[in-house]
Image (spheres, rainbow, N blue to C red):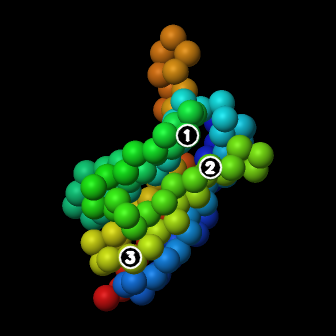
Amino acid sequence: QVHLVESGGGLVQAGGSPILTCTASESTASFNGIGWYRQAPGKQRELVAEIRREGTTDYVDSVKGRFIISRDNAKNTVTLQMNTLKPEDTAVYYCYAWIRIFTTKVFWGQGTQVTVSS
């Protein structure tokens, strides 16, 4: 079983630049993709950013140019550098990872709250 543990977040002022870190219990290089979802109050969970095994990245439009996802396979971590935070970025941020070997398995962290004050 893969374990993902998030750290970072908390209460941040608008315009701030916190970093979220996800530490995996096994090599991040073993995942087809690893990244972050978020869920704001009353809204559906949405994909924020993902980095795939080959290094390509995807971002939701609302964070493009502000957030940067990166991966350190030696440390088994993936980080989300969040810049120029806005109140609408307030959400619980979940780390996830997926592996496809015949079937697809998805693993989730417990989530970390990010609250942006205006």
- Determine whether, in the image, residue 23 is placed left or right of residue 104: right
The answer to which of marks 2 and 3 sits earlier in the sequence is: 2
Q: State the mark number for residue 71.
A: 2
Q: Position of residue 118 (x, y in %)?
A: 31, 88
Q: Position of residue 2 (x, y in %)?
A: 64, 36
Task: Name the residue that disc number 3 marks.
Answer: 85
How many angstroms separate mark 3 from mark 1 (CA)? 25 Å
> Label 1 near label 3: C-beta < 8 Å?
no
Crowd rating for badge 2 (residues with CA inside 10 Å; few <14, some 14–19, many 20+)? many
Q: Position of residue 62 (x, y in %)?
A: 28, 61
What is the three-letter code of the residue carrying label 2? Arg
Query: Mark 3 falls on what kind of element?
Result: loop
Residue 93, relative to residue 96: is it above or below? below
How many angstroms separate mark 2 from mark 1 (CA)? 9 Å
Q: Residue at x 39, y 77 (%)?
A: 84
Task: Name the residue that disc number 1 marks.
Answer: 55
Q: Residue furthest top?
A: 102
Q: State the mark number for residue 14.
A: none
The answer to which of marks 2 and 1 sits earlier in the sequence is: 1
Q: Looking at the image, can residue 113 be seen?
A: no
Q: Nearer the viewer, mark 3 or mark 1?
A: 1
> Label 1 near label 2: C-beta < 8 Å?
yes
What is the three-letter code of the residue carrying label 3? Leu
How many angstroms separate mark 2 from mark 3 (CA)? 21 Å
What is the three-letter code of the residue carrying label 1? Gly
* Quadrant of residue 26 within the rendered picture: top right
Crowd rating for badge 1 (residues with CA inside 10 Å; few <14, some 14–19, many 20+)? few
Residue 102, relative to residue 87: is it above or below? above
